Image: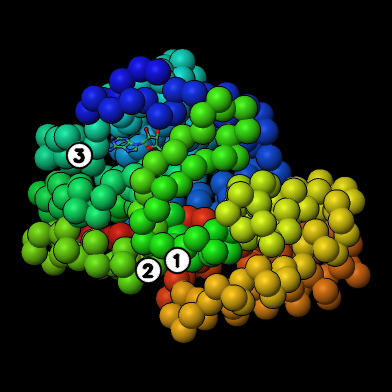
Amino acid sequence: MNAQAGGETDLYADALGHYRSPDRGDAVKVDWERPDYVGLLRVALRHVRAGRRGIRVVDLGAGAGEGWWLTRAALGRGVHFGYTAVDSSPSLLALGERRLGGEAGVRFRLTDMRDFDFAADPTDVYLSVGAPFSELDEESFAEVVRGIGMAVASRRGPSAVVLDVYGRDCLSWIPVAADRRTYSMTFFLDAASPPTRDMRFYTRGRLERVIHNGLTDAARNRLTGLVFSDRCVFSSRHTLTGAYNPDVPRLRTAVNALINGEDVPDGDRGLVIPEKAYLPHLGATPSHRALARTVDTWNKTVHTGLLGGRRSLARSLRGLNQITGTAAAGIGHYLTVVALFAAG
Ligand SMILES: C[S@@+](CC[C@H](N)C(=O)[O-])C[C@H]1O[C@@H](n2cnc3c(N)ncnc32)[C@H](O)[C@@H]1O
């Protein structure tokens, strides 16, 4: 394995197959997850008036450049934008360069985001996807937020920042839920050693605290809104393998079948979530209450929707896979926040 920026081992070097694989873009990813993220990105882009020329985006923990595709989807083909990919993994960034190197306005920065000089080039939108901030300890995360905030506060125009972390109380790992634990991406099926790291997991309250602790007064005074979103509530890739919660049915496999108009393996049992998959793990916290409510709604939707046909059930379930606004709690595979900063 190579060394990554900052001197640590390039954890993602063995997992390039996952990023290259067409299976990564399964029906759930294409029809549910990407459009849901693109919807959040549009909130950010509208705020900075993306219609104007020369919008610039910095993708933190960009990997192979997923943020470029998402930004293009959010803006529409043919709208020019500047895109800087920042990542500490040489192997993923090199894959991104091979894919996007020919596109105008694309730059790659092989650096640890903790060392990135945000002040040198303040930009319109900072985005992240795939929970790169969960790979930082909370103090470093707040430091990066501080750096972004100082850059944002130095600009005349509005800015938006999309921060993506793992949700603490996702159904697919509720038996092992904790603020911090060793996390292995076992769904990277062809990786000799799947990326495994000490990761941080967030409820909405905890993520809000990191933002408020990180921002300087000048940046906090420009902050006009935080839009939270639980993403991939039921479609976590861990439901392909049952790695952390074997009592959850293989929901992602089942939903892929529904979207494709195919029979669901195991019929209703492939979609109905049994009580043993979550009830024994629940306390009285807001996120646990949110999880119980959401699972109940999912099961009811499955029971009533099974009569209506596969594709229509897939459409009904899709609306439950993302929870945006004050109800977002940290129960998705990802917890995402769009922070909106006013013009100075
Ligand atoms: C799960 S991958 C997501 C990659 C990409 N955003 C995507 O969605 O495909 C997390 C990425 O964060 C990067 N990353 C983690 N910690 C980082 C740091 N301190 N500085 C820069 N990149 C980091 C990793 O190298 C990896 O590419």
Report the side of 128 relative to 276 (left or right). left
Classify mark 1: helix, strand or loop: loop
Task: Find residue 113 and report its image quarter.
Answer: top left
Classify mark 3: helix, strand or loop: helix
Asked if ligand 1 lies within 8 A of label 3, the reply is yes
Task: Find residue 191 and report its image quarter.
Answer: top right
User: Is 239 placed above or below 342 here?
Assistant: above
Q: Which residue is the site of mark 3? A: 114
**Residue 35: x %, y % from top left:** 58, 50
**Residue 316: x %, y % from top left:** 73, 66
Q: Which residue is the site of mark 1? A: 330
Q: Nearer the viewer, residue 33 or 115?
A: 115
Q: Earlier in the sequence, mark 1 or mark 3?
A: 3
Q: Which residue is the site of mark 2? A: 204
User: Is 204 placed above or below 100 here?
Assistant: below
Classify mark 2: helix, strand or loop: helix
Say which quadrant the C terminus sits in: bottom left
Q: Residue at x 73, y 59 (%)?
A: 249
Give the Cα distance between marks 1 and 2. Answer: 6 Å
Q: Quadrant of ligand 1?
A: top left
**Residue 216: x %, y % from top left:** 10, 59
Report the side of 154 relative to 323 (left or right). left
Residue that extends furthest to the bottom in the rendered view of this protein: 284
Give the Cα distance between marks 1 and 3. Answer: 24 Å
Residues tagged 1 and 2 counted as in contact (Cβ below 8 A) = yes
Q: Earlier in the sequence, mark 2 or mark 3?
A: 3
Q: Nearer the viewer, residue 181 or 261?
A: 181
Task: Find residue 276 and report its image quarter.
Answer: bottom right
Residue 221 in sight from this viewpoint: yes
